[in-house]
Image (spheres, helix red, strand yellow):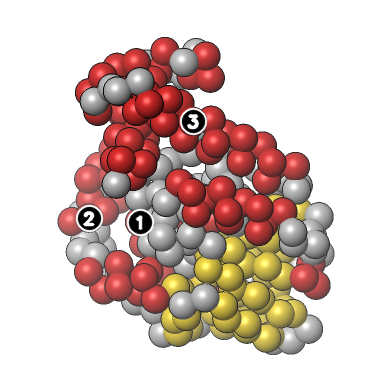
Amino acid sequence: MQKVTDNVYVESEISVCNTSVVVTKEGVVVIDTPMVPANAKKVAADIAKFGPVRYVINSEPHTDHIAGNCYFGGLVVTHDGTRNALLKAKPEDITGMLQMMAPDSLPLDKEFRFRPSDITFSERLALYLGDHSFHLIHMPGHTPYSLAVYVPEERIVFTSDNINLGMPVFRDALPDKWLETLTQLEELDVDKVVPGHGEVTDKSCFSQMSKNVRGWIDAVADAIDKGMNLEEAIEEVPKAEMFADMPKEGPAAGFLRMNIERIYRYLKK
Protein backbone atom coordinates (compact mmCIF):
# COMPACT_ATOMS: atom_id res chain seq x y z
CA MET A 1 0.00 0.00 0.00
CA GLN A 2 1.16 3.50 -0.81
CA LYS A 3 1.26 5.88 2.13
CA VAL A 4 -0.31 9.13 0.96
CA THR A 5 -0.54 11.06 4.24
CA ASP A 6 0.11 10.08 7.86
CA ASN A 7 -3.31 8.42 7.99
CA VAL A 8 -4.19 7.58 4.38
CA TYR A 9 -3.06 4.58 2.34
CA VAL A 10 -3.98 3.55 -1.20
CA GLU A 11 -3.73 0.09 -2.78
CA SER A 12 -3.62 0.42 -6.56
CA GLU A 13 -1.60 -2.59 -7.69
CA ILE A 14 -3.95 -5.52 -7.01
CA SER A 15 -7.35 -3.91 -6.48
CA VAL A 16 -8.36 -3.17 -10.13
CA CYS A 17 -9.87 0.08 -8.85
CA ASN A 18 -8.05 1.98 -6.09
CA THR A 19 -8.85 0.73 -2.60
CA SER A 20 -8.18 3.43 -0.02
CA VAL A 21 -7.82 3.36 3.75
CA VAL A 22 -8.18 6.20 6.26
CA VAL A 23 -6.91 5.33 9.74
CA THR A 24 -8.59 7.14 12.63
CA LYS A 25 -8.31 6.93 16.43
CA GLU A 26 -11.52 4.90 16.51
CA GLY A 27 -10.96 2.53 13.62
CA VAL A 28 -10.56 2.34 9.87
CA VAL A 29 -12.62 3.58 6.93
CA VAL A 30 -12.20 1.69 3.63
CA ILE A 31 -13.17 3.29 0.32
CA ASP A 32 -13.93 0.72 -2.42
CA THR A 33 -13.05 -2.96 -2.25
CA PRO A 34 -11.00 -5.22 -4.57
CA MET A 35 -12.88 -7.22 -7.18
CA VAL A 36 -10.75 -10.41 -7.18
CA PRO A 37 -11.64 -12.43 -4.05
CA ALA A 38 -8.08 -13.51 -3.21
CA ASN A 39 -6.90 -9.92 -3.50
CA ALA A 40 -9.80 -8.67 -1.40
CA LYS A 41 -8.86 -11.13 1.35
CA LYS A 42 -5.21 -10.05 1.21
CA VAL A 43 -6.06 -6.35 1.37
CA ALA A 44 -8.51 -6.99 4.22
CA ALA A 45 -5.77 -8.78 6.17
CA ASP A 46 -3.32 -5.93 5.53
CA ILE A 47 -5.87 -3.35 6.64
CA ALA A 48 -6.61 -5.27 9.86
CA LYS A 49 -3.12 -4.25 11.06
CA PHE A 50 -4.37 -0.65 11.28
CA GLY A 51 -7.37 -1.52 13.43
CA PRO A 52 -10.98 -2.66 13.04
CA VAL A 53 -12.89 -1.59 9.94
CA ARG A 54 -15.76 0.66 10.99
CA TYR A 55 -17.09 1.67 7.58
CA VAL A 56 -16.73 0.50 3.97
CA ILE A 57 -17.74 3.19 1.47
CA ASN A 58 -18.52 2.20 -2.12
CA SER A 59 -18.05 5.22 -4.38
CA GLU A 60 -20.07 3.82 -7.32
CA PRO A 61 -22.07 0.74 -8.37
CA HIS A 62 -19.64 -0.82 -10.87
CA THR A 63 -18.42 -4.30 -9.99
CA ASP A 64 -14.75 -3.36 -9.63
CA HIS A 65 -15.65 -1.06 -6.70
CA ILE A 66 -18.15 -3.23 -4.81
CA ALA A 67 -17.42 -6.93 -5.29
CA GLY A 68 -15.04 -7.31 -2.34
CA ASN A 69 -17.45 -5.97 0.30
CA CYS A 70 -18.19 -9.41 1.73
CA TYR A 71 -14.59 -9.86 2.90
CA PHE A 72 -14.60 -6.74 5.08
CA GLY A 73 -16.18 -5.90 8.42
CA GLY A 74 -17.86 -2.66 9.40
CA LEU A 75 -20.95 -1.01 7.95
CA VAL A 76 -21.27 -0.58 4.18
CA VAL A 77 -22.21 2.97 3.11
CA THR A 78 -23.33 3.87 -0.42
CA HIS A 79 -25.63 6.04 -2.47
CA ASP A 80 -29.21 4.76 -2.66
CA GLY A 81 -28.68 3.78 -6.30
CA THR A 82 -25.61 1.71 -5.49
CA ARG A 83 -27.54 -0.26 -2.89
CA ASN A 84 -30.15 -1.07 -5.53
CA ALA A 85 -27.38 -2.29 -7.84
CA LEU A 86 -25.91 -4.45 -5.06
CA LEU A 87 -29.29 -6.01 -4.34
CA LYS A 88 -29.77 -6.90 -8.01
CA ALA A 89 -26.21 -8.19 -8.58
CA LYS A 90 -25.62 -11.92 -9.03
CA PRO A 91 -22.37 -13.93 -8.87
CA GLU A 92 -22.51 -14.53 -12.62
CA ASP A 93 -22.15 -10.76 -13.08
CA ILE A 94 -18.53 -11.05 -12.00
CA THR A 95 -17.47 -14.45 -13.37
CA GLY A 96 -16.94 -13.24 -16.93
CA MET A 97 -14.60 -10.47 -15.80
CA LEU A 98 -12.71 -12.84 -13.51
CA GLN A 99 -12.37 -15.36 -16.34
CA MET A 100 -10.41 -12.72 -18.27
CA MET A 101 -8.49 -11.15 -15.40
CA ALA A 102 -8.02 -13.84 -12.76
CA PRO A 103 -9.18 -17.27 -13.96
CA ASP A 104 -7.48 -18.93 -10.96
CA SER A 105 -10.07 -17.25 -8.72
CA LEU A 106 -12.86 -19.35 -10.23
CA PRO A 107 -15.04 -20.96 -9.15
CA LEU A 108 -16.01 -18.34 -6.59
CA ASP A 109 -15.55 -19.41 -2.97
CA LYS A 110 -18.54 -20.05 -0.70
CA GLU A 111 -17.94 -16.80 1.15
CA PHE A 112 -18.57 -14.65 -1.90
CA ARG A 113 -21.73 -12.60 -2.13
CA PHE A 114 -22.62 -9.09 -3.19
CA ARG A 115 -22.94 -7.54 0.25
CA PRO A 116 -25.48 -4.67 0.17
CA SER A 117 -25.34 -1.36 2.00
CA ASP A 118 -26.23 -0.87 5.65
CA ILE A 119 -26.45 2.93 5.32
CA THR A 120 -27.47 4.93 2.23
CA PHE A 121 -28.04 8.55 1.30
CA SER A 122 -29.28 10.55 -1.66
CA GLU A 123 -27.30 13.81 -1.73
CA ARG A 124 -24.99 14.30 1.26
CA LEU A 125 -23.93 12.36 4.34
CA ALA A 126 -21.32 13.09 7.02
CA LEU A 127 -19.64 10.40 9.09
CA TYR A 128 -17.51 11.24 12.14
CA LEU A 129 -14.89 8.88 13.51
CA GLY A 130 -12.17 9.85 15.96
CA ASP A 131 -10.74 13.18 14.84
CA HIS A 132 -11.83 12.67 11.23
CA SER A 133 -14.92 13.64 9.28
CA PHE A 134 -15.97 11.99 6.04
CA HIS A 135 -18.18 14.09 3.78
CA LEU A 136 -19.94 11.92 1.18
CA ILE A 137 -21.25 14.02 -1.69
CA HIS A 138 -23.40 12.72 -4.54
CA MET A 139 -21.52 13.70 -7.70
CA PRO A 140 -23.12 12.11 -10.78
CA GLY A 141 -21.04 11.82 -13.93
CA HIS A 142 -19.22 8.57 -14.64
CA THR A 143 -22.35 6.92 -13.22
CA PRO A 144 -25.63 8.44 -11.97
CA TYR A 145 -24.73 7.31 -8.43
CA SER A 146 -21.05 8.25 -8.19
CA LEU A 147 -19.92 10.02 -5.05
CA ALA A 148 -16.88 11.82 -3.71
CA VAL A 149 -15.47 11.30 -0.22
CA TYR A 150 -13.93 14.50 1.12
CA VAL A 151 -11.79 14.26 4.27
CA PRO A 152 -10.85 17.85 5.19
CA GLU A 153 -8.54 16.84 8.04
CA GLU A 154 -6.29 15.11 5.50
CA ARG A 155 -6.91 17.69 2.73
CA ILE A 156 -7.82 14.87 0.41
CA VAL A 157 -10.73 13.77 -1.78
CA PHE A 158 -11.52 10.34 -3.20
CA THR A 159 -13.30 10.88 -6.52
CA SER A 160 -14.20 7.44 -7.83
CA ASP A 161 -14.03 7.21 -11.65
CA ASN A 162 -15.14 10.80 -12.11
CA ILE A 163 -11.36 11.19 -12.23
CA ASN A 164 -9.63 8.60 -14.40
CA LEU A 165 -6.72 10.05 -16.32
CA GLY A 166 -6.71 7.16 -18.74
CA MET A 167 -9.66 6.74 -21.11
CA PRO A 168 -12.87 7.96 -19.46
CA VAL A 169 -15.61 5.32 -19.48
CA PHE A 170 -19.04 6.59 -20.51
CA ARG A 171 -20.95 3.29 -20.30
CA ASP A 172 -23.48 4.59 -17.74
CA ALA A 173 -22.38 8.22 -17.80
CA LEU A 174 -24.36 11.44 -17.60
CA PRO A 175 -21.98 13.56 -19.70
CA ASP A 176 -23.36 17.01 -18.85
CA LYS A 177 -23.57 16.18 -15.13
CA TRP A 178 -19.97 14.93 -15.30
CA LEU A 179 -18.78 18.39 -16.33
CA GLU A 180 -20.79 19.98 -13.50
CA THR A 181 -19.27 17.54 -11.01
CA LEU A 182 -15.74 18.37 -12.12
CA THR A 183 -16.46 22.05 -11.48
CA GLN A 184 -17.73 21.16 -8.00
CA LEU A 185 -14.65 19.09 -7.25
CA GLU A 186 -12.39 21.98 -8.17
CA GLU A 187 -13.98 24.05 -5.39
CA LEU A 188 -12.82 21.64 -2.67
CA ASP A 189 -9.88 22.72 -0.50
CA VAL A 190 -7.57 19.74 -1.04
CA ASP A 191 -3.94 19.00 -1.76
CA LYS A 192 -4.32 15.39 -2.88
CA VAL A 193 -6.80 13.61 -5.13
CA VAL A 194 -7.27 9.84 -5.21
CA PRO A 195 -8.86 8.86 -8.55
CA GLY A 196 -10.86 5.73 -9.19
CA HIS A 197 -7.88 4.23 -11.02
CA GLY A 198 -4.25 5.24 -11.30
CA GLU A 199 -1.80 7.33 -9.35
CA VAL A 200 -2.67 9.77 -6.58
CA THR A 201 -2.57 13.27 -8.02
CA ASP A 202 -3.43 16.90 -7.22
CA LYS A 203 -6.11 19.45 -8.15
CA SER A 204 -4.69 19.94 -11.63
CA CYS A 205 -6.48 16.72 -12.58
CA PHE A 206 -9.89 18.42 -12.42
CA SER A 207 -9.29 20.77 -15.34
CA GLN A 208 -7.43 18.04 -17.22
CA MET A 209 -10.36 15.63 -16.80
CA SER A 210 -12.87 18.33 -17.72
CA LYS A 211 -10.99 19.02 -20.95
CA ASN A 212 -10.96 15.31 -21.73
CA VAL A 213 -14.67 14.76 -21.06
CA ARG A 214 -15.56 17.93 -22.98
CA GLY A 215 -13.47 16.71 -25.91
CA TRP A 216 -15.43 13.45 -26.12
CA ILE A 217 -18.77 15.25 -25.91
CA ASP A 218 -17.81 17.83 -28.53
CA ALA A 219 -16.51 15.18 -30.95
CA VAL A 220 -19.80 13.27 -30.85
CA ALA A 221 -21.91 16.45 -30.89
CA ASP A 222 -20.07 17.52 -34.04
CA ALA A 223 -20.95 14.22 -35.70
CA ILE A 224 -24.61 14.72 -34.78
CA ASP A 225 -24.54 18.29 -36.12
CA LYS A 226 -23.25 16.90 -39.42
CA GLY A 227 -26.28 14.61 -39.65
CA MET A 228 -24.45 11.33 -38.99
CA ASN A 229 -26.39 8.36 -37.74
CA LEU A 230 -24.93 6.23 -34.93
CA GLU A 231 -22.97 3.84 -37.12
CA GLU A 232 -21.52 6.71 -39.14
CA ALA A 233 -20.50 8.47 -35.94
CA ILE A 234 -18.81 5.32 -34.62
CA GLU A 235 -16.87 5.14 -37.89
CA GLU A 236 -15.92 8.83 -38.16
CA VAL A 237 -15.44 10.13 -34.60
CA PRO A 238 -12.28 8.04 -33.93
CA LYS A 239 -10.62 9.86 -36.84
CA ALA A 240 -10.65 13.11 -34.83
CA GLU A 241 -7.24 14.44 -33.82
CA MET A 242 -7.83 13.84 -30.09
CA PHE A 243 -8.14 10.10 -30.77
CA ALA A 244 -5.06 9.84 -33.02
CA ASP A 245 -2.95 7.90 -30.50
CA MET A 246 -5.75 5.68 -29.26
CA PRO A 247 -5.59 1.99 -30.28
CA LYS A 248 -8.21 1.15 -32.88
CA GLU A 249 -8.10 -2.60 -32.21
CA GLY A 250 -8.45 -4.82 -29.16
CA PRO A 251 -10.21 -3.86 -25.89
CA ALA A 252 -9.57 -0.13 -26.40
CA ALA A 253 -11.56 -0.23 -29.64
CA GLY A 254 -14.50 -1.73 -27.75
CA PHE A 255 -14.41 1.06 -25.18
CA LEU A 256 -14.12 3.63 -27.96
CA ARG A 257 -17.27 2.34 -29.66
CA MET A 258 -19.12 2.03 -26.34
CA ASN A 259 -18.26 5.61 -25.35
CA ILE A 260 -19.35 7.06 -28.68
CA GLU A 261 -22.62 5.12 -28.60
CA ARG A 262 -23.44 6.20 -25.03
CA ILE A 263 -22.70 9.89 -25.71
CA TYR A 264 -24.55 9.80 -29.04
CA ARG A 265 -27.71 8.31 -27.54
CA TYR A 266 -27.56 10.65 -24.53
CA LEU A 267 -27.19 13.78 -26.64
CA LYS A 268 -29.91 12.71 -29.06
CA LYS A 269 -32.29 12.02 -26.16
Distance from label 1 to label 2 (Cα)? 8 Å
Q: Nearer the viewer, residue 90 or 246?
A: 246
Would residue 252 be visible to someone looking at this image?
no
Query: Residue at image x 76%, y 54%?
Result: 192
Left or right of 214: which side holds 107? Answer: left
Q: Is residue 253 above or below residue 207?
A: above
Q: Which residue is label 3 attached to? A: 218
Instruction: For the residues labelled 1 and 3, say whether their Cβ atoms are less than 8 Å apart.
Output: no
Q: In this figure, which residue is indicated by the disc labeled 2?
A: 93
Name the disc covering residue 266, or none. none
Label 3: state its secondary structure. helix
Image quadrant holding the N terminus, namely bottom right
Whether residue 135 is visible to the viewer of this picture, yes or no, is yes
The amino acid type found where label 3 is placed reads Asp
Where residue 66 appears, x then y in whole percent?
40, 63
Q: Is residue 69 above or below residue 214?
A: below
